Image (spheres, helix red, strand yellow):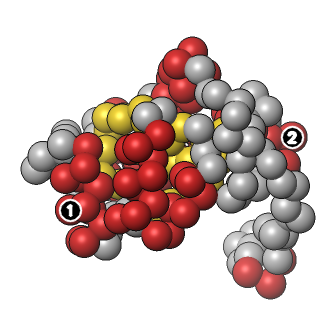
Amino acid sequence: MTDAIQSRRSIRKYKPDVPVTREQLNRLMHAAMLAPSARNSRPWEFVSVTRRETLDEIVRIAPNAHMCASAPAAIVLVAIPQTGLPEGYFPQDCGAATQNILLEATAMGLGTCWCGVYPREARVAAIGGLLNIREPKLAFCVIAVGVPDETPEPRGFFEESKVTYIE
């Protein structure tokens, strides 16, 4: 797992001619559903997108997801805020599910880029309208998926100055 954590990058350019299979996408969503959630509420659903026209429409309505223009697939994580108790933890829960997708994709040799949708109301509405996501559900994020066509340098690093030790 440490290898996937250390080698994960946000990929913004993909090899568009190399498809992502349904089996690969299912493996990613399987990993997402293994994420922890408050009281095992699992406040998520997923929309798998491989239709080129839909990926292009995502780019048009969510410019921060411009990498979907070359990605052969995307996973849209759909949050269900009212699921379970305690209420209000769906952003953490969905973030954990998203991170599992990113790490599993890296372990599989795929690249991803996490594109925020929630809490931007206009993006939530636009992506929701495109994919027929109805309240109380909401589009949480778009994750572009594909074979990387770039190798970005690492951006994360350990900063001990941001750690407080209580011993």
Q: Nearer the viewer, residue 134 or 167?
A: 134
Q: Quadrant of residue 162?
A: bottom right
Residue assigned mark 1: 125
Q: Residue 111, how many percent across, how many down? A: 71, 44
- Mark 2, residues whose alpha carbon is within 10 Å: few (<14), some, or many (≥20)? few
Residue 112 drawn above or below residue 157: above
Residue 3 disc label: 2
Q: Looking at the image, which residue is at 47% across and 40% down? A: 52
Q: Residue 48, how many percent across, how many down? A: 42, 32
Q: Looking at the image, which residue is at 71% across and 30% down? A: 18
- Answer yes or no: is residue 14 visible: yes
Residue 43 drawn above or below residue 9: above
Q: Looking at the image, which residue is at 86% across and 40% down? A: 3
Identify which amino acid the numbered label 1 is placed on.
Ala
- Mark 1, residues whose alpha carbon is within 10 Å: few (<14), some, or many (≥20)? many
Residue 19 drawn above or below residue 74: above
The residues tagged by marks 2 and 1 sit, at their Cα atoms, a distance apart of: 37 Å
